Amino acid sequence: MFASITLKGAALLRRVEQSKRVGRRIRVALTALLLPLVVGSAASVDSPENGSVAESRIVGGVPASTADHPWMAALTTPNGDLYCGGALVAPDKVVTAAHCLVLPSEQGVRVKSRTDVRVVVGRTDLRTTEGVQAGVRSIWVHPRYSSFVEGEDVAVITLDRRIDAPTATLVGHGDERLYSPGTPATTMGWGRTSENGATSATLRSLDLPMIADADCARSYPEYDPAAMVCAGYLEGGRDACAGDSGGPLIVEGRVVGLVSWGDGCAREGSPGVYTRLLEYRSLLAHQTGV
Ligand code: ARG
């Protein structure tokens, strides 16, 4: 507890010293604030059937089915526009990123109104009515969340109904080895299939290796190994992207991370940063009952 606060303080000081990096930090932060709006209003038009975009989907991924990932959740606006992912971990609990559930405000952040969020499970193609949709009873956002580059990018939605689907398994105490560099992982979502492209109407998944803290820290001065973990490809080309946020990073069938942030998408030297869920395991147990 104290150790993590001290680390946090040190990380903040480091950040202040890195004023020359502020330009990029602002770019990353602005992308974060603006993208959910843009994504939310864009129609999900990048049909995978048109086959015209060579290096696309999630970015560089392959088609996936909710039949194989029955707990994979899409967060949508009341109009049905996708803006984030999540994981059903109990019949009425969805784990997602904090930044999917807050709005910027003068005091830092404000939690979205529960009526602004819908949760869809079991719908590979968001243009269909397959699967089930639920509304939101309540939203818990990590109390110290302020922006994803500062960590604590985790939240839990309590649904207004129970969804009868297999649930995802969260990383457990003692699962540290799942974060070892090079370990094969998978992420998925309906997010953009290129940095400035449209979101995908259909679920896409991407296999990617876990990345060492030292490599991630070289990519991002904001990287905090006590709250985040990187996964992906330093050479670029394959990555999660806007709209995938809150979706899972899976290792050996366990959700070890949540899509959180990155500098653009799939750029060389800028892998995806994920919420390090093991760090929040006790809080999540308390919030989800699992
Ligand atoms: N934060 C963005 C969102 O709201 C995208 C996060 C992932 N970015 C990345 N390059 N891996 O969806």
Image (cartoon, rainbow, N blue to C red):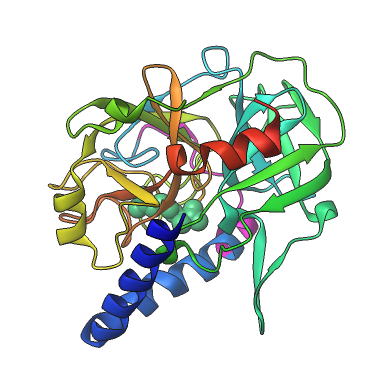
User: Between 147 and 12, which is closer to the camera in this rendering?
Assistant: 12
Q: In the rendered image, which quarter contains the C terminus?
A: top right
Q: Evaluate whether residue 196 shows in this view.
A: no
On screen, 103 above or below 61?
below
Q: Which of these two is toward me, 97 or 204?
A: 97
Residue drawn at (50%, 67%), measured in percent from left and top?
Answer: 147
The total of numbered circles placed on residues is 0
- 43 part of magenta stretch: yes
Question: Residue at left 32%, top 70%?
Answer: 11
Residue 231, x across and y down, in percent: 28, 41
Q: Is residue 35 left or right of residue 15?
A: right
Answer above or below: position of 217 versus 134.
below
Q: Position of residue 239 (x, y in %)?
A: 31, 43
Indicate left or right for 119 with 38 as reference.
right
For residue 205, say whether it is visible.
yes
Residues shaded magenta: 38-51
Across and down, in percent, residue 133 comes to 78, 31
- Residue 224: % across, % down: 32, 58
Asked if the magenta segment contains residue 180, the reply would be no
What is the residue that sits farthest to the front in this orientation?
A: 2
Above or below residue 287? Residue 66 is above
Going by the image, does 125 lie left or right of 57? right
Residue 112, compared with residue 227, is above or below; it is: below
Q: Residue at x 83, y 40 (%)?
A: 135
